[in-house]
């Protein structure tokens, strides 16, 4: 994914660059992620929750606010093994991208980084954070 902000072009690795964000909403998300706090969004009108957060509700189009998301354990719902990666991730191929579902019902997509065998739908996942370099941080699944 490439994000263009003014003259700068920054590439994101299934995560986020901690440089200045495009909107104050996203900037707040990044500042919390920098502190290894994952934020969800909650619609101010209908209460719908989103993870990763979105600024506007998909259901009623109202504004959402950020709240800390504290759940750390999930269950594997789906995964894919990526053999042919985009150019920015070719050094990591093959890798696993997985969807984990938290007890609250919210789902999150991230890499599984420590799999020693084939993942199994239903297995337990643990959310962790990974600092890629001084300006990039992401979240990941551990099994």
Image (tube, rainbow, N blue to C red):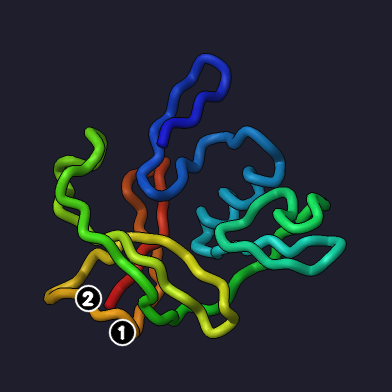
Who's the residue at 36% across and 63% down the image? Answer: 140
Q: 17 and 120: which one is in front?
A: 120
Residue 54 location, x and y as percent?
65, 52
- Tell me if residue 34 comes above or below residue 36 in the rendering: above
Relative to 23, residue 4 above or below: above
Label 1 residue SS? loop
- State the separation of the CA atoms marked 2 and 1: 7 Å
Badge 1, how many Cα within 10 Å: few under 14, some, many 20+? Answer: few
Disc 2 target residue: 119
Figure label count: 2
Query: How many C-alpha atoms fall within 10 Å of the one at disc 2: few (<14), some, or many (≥20)?
Result: some
Seen in the image, is 79 located left or right of residue 30? left
Q: Say if mark 2 contacts mark 1, CB within 8 Å.
A: yes
Name the residue furthest front: 59
Q: Which mark is residue 139?
A: none
**94 horizontally vs 112: left or right:** left
Residue 113: image quadrant is bottom left
Looking at the rendering, which quadrant does residue 11 occupy? top left
Q: Quadrant of the C terminus?
A: bottom left
x%, y% of residue 41? Answer: 68, 61
The answer to which of 5 and 109 lies nearer the viewer is: 109
Q: Name the spot of residue 14 as percent of width and height, x first.
A: 38, 49
| Helix, strand or loop status at disc 2 | loop
Mark number displayed over residue 123:
1
Q: In what quadrant of the picture does the N terminus appear? A: top left
Q: What residue appears at the point 25 percent right and 37 percent down from the top-left corner?
A: 86
Residue at 78% in and 61% down: 43
Decide if residue 105 is on the left or right side of residue 85. right
* Of the pair 58 and 2, the residue shown nearer to us: 58
């Amino acid at each position: 994914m490439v994000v263009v902000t003014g003259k700068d072009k920054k590439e994101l690795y299934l995560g986020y660059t901690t440089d200045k964000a495009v909107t104050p909403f996203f900037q707040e998300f990044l500042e919390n992620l920098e502190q290894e706090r994952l934020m969800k969004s909650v619609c101010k009108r209908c209460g719908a929750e989103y993870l990763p957060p979105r600024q506007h509700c998909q259901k009623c189009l109202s504004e959402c606010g950020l709240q800390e998301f504290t759940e750390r354990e999930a269950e594997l719902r789906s995964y894919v093994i990526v053999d042919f990666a985009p150019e920015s991730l070719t050094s990591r191929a093959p890798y696993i991208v997985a969807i984990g579902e938290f007890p609250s019902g919210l789902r999150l997509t991230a890499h599984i980084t420590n799999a020693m065998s084939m993942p199994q739908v239903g297995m337990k996942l643990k959310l962790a954070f990974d600092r890629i370099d001084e300006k990039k941080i992401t979240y990941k699944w551990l099994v």
